[in-house]
């Protein structure tokens, strides 16, 4: 039922059941790593919300949650990679064990900017957990500590990821029909 295709969707890459099972595994790894600590999950709005809440429910150490919003745009020559914080965190991360939660790491520009910014605020530790990783398109090298799934070079939607703000609420991850993502 959850994987009924809607117009614009080409094929399902990960079903709701596959996502849930993989998130449980990842939450187990995270719980073991942060044993005896409190982990602060920082979600990057809006794409990471669905992943962050699913993940948080299965983490077995104390969890704090905060969010930041970013906007990214091209520079004058049309190259991507200009990122700024549009909505900052509500609280300080000084001395905290921070796990930055992303929807997808693509070129790596967004993550590099966020890691530089957050590292300057004195966290006790700073790690990265991404729902999807499209490593084949990486331009800048960034550390990814936890990833749910590696994906092929296709534009994807669902489970938080959007196309023109649509499709975030799909329970599965799907590739868009090629002409839709142009
Ligand atoms: P990066 O800076 O190129 O790594 O871009 C990462 C951001 O681009 C993600 O946080 C998403 O918001 C967006 N993005 C990249 N690929 C996709 C995709 O396939 N579907 C939806 N959003 C994407
Ligand atoms: Mg994003």
Image: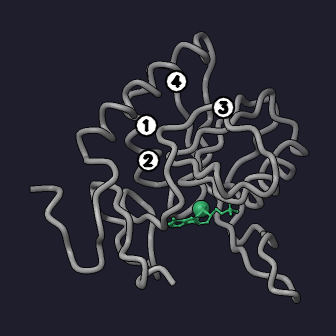
Residue 67 sits above or below residue 78 on the image: above
Name which residue lies at 59% across and 45% down: 101
Q: Earlier in the sequence, mark 4 or mark 2?
A: 2
Q: Which mark is residue 51?
A: 2
Secondary element at tag 2: helix
Q: Which residue is mark 3?
A: 145
Name the residue nearer the viewer: 30 or 81.
81
Quadrant for ligand 1 reads bottom right
Name the residue nearer the viewer: 6 or 47.
6
Neighbor class of circle 1 (other Cα within 10 Å; few <14, some 14-19, many 20+) is: many
Res. 69 image quadrant: bottom right
Beta carbon at label 3 within 8 Å of ligand 1: no
Q: Earlier in the sequence, mark 4 or mark 3?
A: 4
Name the residue nearer the viewer: 147 or 84.
147
Secondary element at tag 3: loop
Q: Which residue is mark 1?
A: 55
Q: Residue 163: x and y, percent?
A: 45, 76
Specify whether 69 is left or right of 179.
right
Secondary element at tag 4: loop
Label 4, label 1: how far apart the Cα atoms are = 13 Å
Q: Which mark is residue 62?
A: 4
Q: Earlier in the sequence, mark 2 or mark 3?
A: 2
Neighbor class of circle 3 (other Cα within 10 Å; few <14, some 14-19, many 20+) is: few
Mark nearer the viewer, 2 or 3: 3
Q: Earlier in the sequence, mark 4 or mark 1?
A: 1
């Amino acid at each position: 039922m959850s994987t009924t295709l809607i117009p614009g969707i080409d094929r399902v890459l990960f079903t709701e059941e596959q996502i849930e099972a993989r998130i449980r595994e990842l939450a187990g790894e995270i719980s073991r790593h942060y044993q005896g600590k409190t982990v602060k999950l920082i979600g990057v709005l809006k794409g990471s919300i669905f992943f962050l809440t699913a993940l948080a429910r299965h983490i077995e150490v104390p969890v704090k949650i905060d969010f930041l919003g970013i906007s990214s745009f091209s520079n004058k020559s049309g190259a991507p990679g200009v990122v700024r914080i549009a909505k900052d965190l509500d609280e300080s991360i000084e001395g905290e064990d921070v796990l930055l939660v992303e929807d997808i790491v693509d070129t790596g520009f967004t993550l590099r900017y966020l890691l530089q910014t957050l590292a300057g605020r004195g966290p006790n530790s700073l790690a990265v957990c991404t729902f999807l990783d499209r490593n084949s398109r990486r331009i800048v090298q960034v550390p990814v500590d936890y990833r749910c799934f590696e994906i092929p070079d296709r534009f994807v939607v669902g489970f938080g990821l959007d196309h023109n703000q649509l499709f975030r609420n799909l329970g599965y991850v799907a590739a868009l029909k090629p002409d839709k993502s142009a």
